[in-house]
Image (cartoon, rainbow, N blue to C red):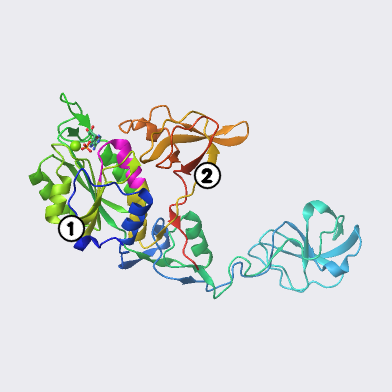
Amino acid sequence: MPQSSEQSAFRPSPENTPMPLAQARARIVDAITPIADTERVALQNALHRVLAERVIAGVNVPGADNSSMDGYGYRAGDVDVDGAALDVVGESLAGHPFAGRVGAGQCVRIMTGAVVPDGVDTVVMQENTRATGERVVIEKRPASGSNIRAAGEDLRAGTTVLAPGHYLRPADIAVLASVGVAEVSVVRRPRVAFFSTGDELRPVDGPAGQSLAPGEIYDSNRYGLAALISELGMEGVDLGVVGDSPAALREAFRKAAVCDAVVTSGGVSVGAADFVLDVLGEQGTVDFWRVAIKPGKPLAFGTLGHARFFGLPGNPVSTAVTFIQMVRPALVRMAGATPAEPIRLALPTLADLRKSPGRENFLRARLVNRDGRAAVEPVDHQGSGVMRSMSRADCFIVLPAAQNDVPAGEIVPVEPFAQTIWGQPES
Ligand code: AMP
Ligand code: MG
């Protein structure tokens, strides 16, 4: 059993055995306490929020039996042969129901979405009829009951529309509106502090301008992290670039500790300028360090004040991979939802894959259509510093730790980036 992070006597050492990803992810997700605070927001502002209440339908959707076609409504029992003619006694339009009752030998002209009048049990589409003055000929009879959408077939009054823990996507917003909900209770958004560490880093939007001094590089991770956090619908708190000194890190950690989560990049390895673990050990707790994946081995997980702490490696691809694999599910749980289990497809690789046994590998790749069948093609450069490999990819090829080289044509496990992140609660 994992120790709780508060009791951990963990001290990083290079001999420390990296933890398998599945174990690390489970341990991280288990350590997360979902945010309990809730707030009410207008439906218009509820996109990408997590529902904090059970929404029960107050009405049937649709509210009444209605037509799914433009055509004529009648009773099927009145028409026993193709070519029969009926008297048109009125019309039912969406928003303007036919008030009367439709009798034997009669029909109404009816439009899509219009209420089905009393006496009607079937709608024939207009294309299968011929109008002749006040009468209409049913040239081709549909089966009895055709083209009628039953009241409550989408949602029945009194049943659950959405359960607590549901992450609200555009379709969910529309479903809530369909039952007349104007406001919902949602979980407070996680506040996620993030910063980059490294004396070599230069912001792209800093006051010192755009040009780089020798040895400097642009800080790409912080912008990528900001985008990953805001893509989840969460509140990022940007603490900028922090230099490679314990003093600078202490100061940044103090500011970050009031948030719900802290995500840092860089300085978490065993280099001469890597102080993140030291300062985390001083000001918070280290739960574990190092995960047996490539790229992304030197990840540190722990606590800092009120916050859960994720120290990600600085190589840009490592930062992105560890965020997706470990931070994202943690933040989803923190937000009050359930992280979805990763979905793995089994697809043939179009190129040879290089792999030495040891760590689980996350190769960047693209899903492709090869002669009408799905396949996967690794991007050309797999270096952990080559962010282009993430930018050009839309999936990972996931090779297990013990795997060796894989020849082209073999079936490999593939994890699309756009897979479901947010699991659905039971309703
Ligand atoms: P570190 O994890 O600090 O040892 O950094 C590993 C590599 O990633 C080094 O080449 C760094 O220069 C680079 N790196 C670290 N942080 C960033 C960043 N925020 N943006 C781009 N590259 C970075
Ligand atoms: Mg560094």
Mark 1 and mark 2: Cα distance apart in space: 39 Å
Where does label 2 land, which residue?
345
Q: Residue 405 placed where, x, y %?
A: 45, 32
Q: Residue 52 placed where, x, y %?
A: 39, 67
Kindly identify the residue that appears in the image at 40 percent across and 39 percent down: 362
Where does label 1 land, which residue?
9
Image vertical order of residue 317 relative to residue 90, above or below? above
Kindly identify the residue that appears in the image at 19 percent across and 33 percent down: 202
- Which circle, 1 or 2, is nearer the viewer? 1
Q: Which residue, as the protein is rendered here, is positioned at the far left?
A: 247
In which image quadrant can residue 296 be found? top left
Q: Nearer the viewer, residue 129 or 379?
A: 379
Dots 1 and 2: beta carbons under 8 Å?
A: no
Left or right, 47 with reference to 270:
right
Element type where label 1 sits in the image: loop
Q: Residue 180 placed where, x, y %?
A: 50, 68
Which residues are the magenta region? 312-324
Q: Residues within 10 Å of mark 1 (few under 14, many from 20)?
A: few
Q: Amino acid at mark 1?
A: Ala
Element type where label 2 sits in the image: strand
Q: Residue 161 placed where, x, y %?
A: 51, 68
Is residue 231 visible in the rendered structure shown here? no
Q: Nearer the viewer, residue 143 or 245?
A: 245
Q: Amino acid at mark 2?
A: Leu
In which image quadrant can residue 7 be found? bottom left
Q: Is mark 1 within 8 Å of ligand 1?
A: no
